[in-house]
Image (spheres, rainbow, N blue to C red):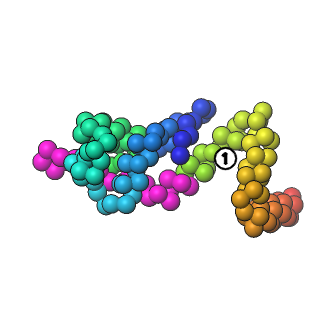
Amino acid sequence: MWLKSSFGRRKTSLEQLGELETELMERAWAHREVTVRDVYNEMHQRLAYTTLMTTLDRLYRKGLLRRRREGKAYFYSAALTEQQYRESLTGHFFEMVLHDSENSSAILSRFVEAVSETDEEMLEKLDEIVKAKRKKLSRSE
C-alpha cells in the first residue's frame, strides 16, 4: 500500500512503499527469514545485489523489517505480520479521512461507490454496521 502520513504523529511503518519494497515485504511475509543472497538468487535477472541490499536496509530503517547479523550476513524478518500491516494501513487511511474535513465527504462517497460496484453484499454489511453503531450511540446518550 502506498500511504504517507501528512499530519500529526509520524508512523514509520506507514512510509510510502515502492513496488520493490512491496515485493520484498511479501517475500519476508512468505518466509521466516531472508538474506540479501536469498532474494538475489530469486531476482538476479532483474535486479542488482546492491539494489536489493539497499532496499532491505531501507525497510529495516522504516521499521518494517527486523534484522540480525550472523557472520557477514544480515537475516531479515518481518516486524509485523501481513495482517497487522494491513490493519495499520486501514487505520491510517481512516485517520487521514477524518483529518481531511474538506475532502472527507468525497472520500467516503467514493468508498461507498467502490464497494457497491464490486460487492453488493459488502454494501449491505456496511449499512448494517452503520445502523448498529447509530443505535449504540443513541443508547449511550
38 w.r.t. 5: above or below:
below
Give, as a single range, the part of the protein colored magenta.
Answer: 67-87
Closer-to-camera residue (91/113): 113
Residue at image location 46% in from the left, 39% down from the top: 18
Residue at image location 61% in from the left, 50% down from the top: 91
Q: Is residue 107 visible?
A: yes
Res 33 quadrant in image: bottom left
Q: State the count of labels.
A: 1
Residue under numbered circle 1: 94
Q: Is residue 35 visible?
A: no
Closer-to-camera residue (109/87): 109
Is 27 one of the magenta-colored residues?
no
Q: Which quadrant of the figure contains the C terminus?
A: bottom right
**Horizontal and vertical percent position of residue 71:** 12, 48
Is 76 one of the magenta-colored residues?
yes
**Horizontal and vertical percent position of residue 133:** 79, 61
Closer-to-camera residue (51/84): 51
Residue at image location 75% in from the left, 67% down from the top: 121
Residue at image location 76% in from the left, 36% down from the top: 103
- Left/right placement of residue 98 relative to residue 50 reads right
